[in-house]
Amino acid sequence: MRALARWAAAAVLILGAWPGAADEAPRILSVDRERALSESAAAERLGVEEREARIALRGELDKLRADLEAEEAEIAALRETAPKEVFEARVRAFDARVREARETSQQKGEALQARFVSARRALSAALEPILRELLAETGADLILDARTVLAAAESVDVTDEVLRRFDERASVALPPPAPAEE
């Protein structure tokens, strides 16, 4: 609460020192940035693509796990019937496949995560030009995140307009589809 009070005091000082503050108060707008980045059509498409990609990866990993478990059971059955050298060779080869599968799974998970982190950054960056347009068009001096505003008139909240413009923009880059399974 003290941090918020200090922030509010700093804002009052800054706004009081604003060029032309004696003549007219600065025009301030607010935008719920989080809402704009989660409710836009592009954000919703990104969310759907991310869920689908995660489900596909989970399915792939589940299949791999099932295959390894089946192979492990097969090797366990060989313990009693196969010569010791043959059994140990199978165990070593299996262990190598398990290590490789873990490494590959981790790399795929990290690549998927990085792809969507990058896409969310691009989505966030696509918001900035819209905010700058609104500043210029309205003659506003400042746009605050609505989540930091304690109280404001409804007229300063331009989130719906930001969402409308954001949805009109087709240039928001979503991640490329995951490569087809080999």
Image: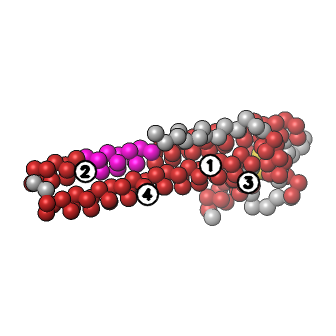
Please tell me which of labels 2 and 3 falls first in the chain. 3
Using the image, tell me which numbered label, if any, was put on residue 127.
none
Residue under the point 13% across and 63% down:
80
Residue with the mark numbered 3: 39
Amino acid bearing label 2: Phe
Amino acid bearing label 4: Asp
- Is residue 28 at least partly visible in the picture? no
Separation (CA) of disc 2 from disc 3: 47 Å
Q: Measuring from the top left, give residue 6's x and y in whole percent.
A: 65, 56
Mark 4 secondary-structure assignment: helix
Residue under the point 22% across and 47% down:
93
Separation (CA) of disc 2 from disc 1: 34 Å
Please tell me which of labels 2 and 1 falls first in the chain. 1
Looking at the image, is mark 1 or mark 4 nearer the viewer?
4
Please tell me which of labels 1 and 4 falls first in the chain. 1
Residue with the mark numbered 1: 49
Please tell me which of labels 3 and 1 falls first in the chain. 3
Which of 173/26 is in front? 173
Bin the neighbour count of mark 4 within 10 Å (Cα to Cα): few under 14, some 14-19, many 20 and up: few
Name the chief secondary structure element in magenta. helix
Residue with the mark numbered 4: 62
Range of magenta residues: 95-108
Amino acid bearing label 1: Glu
Mark 2 secondary-structure assignment: helix
Amino acid bearing label 3: Glu
Q: Are marks 3 and 4 in contact (CB under 8 Å)?
A: no
Using the image, tell me which numbered label, if any, was put on residue 94.
2
Q: Is residue 85 magenta?
A: no
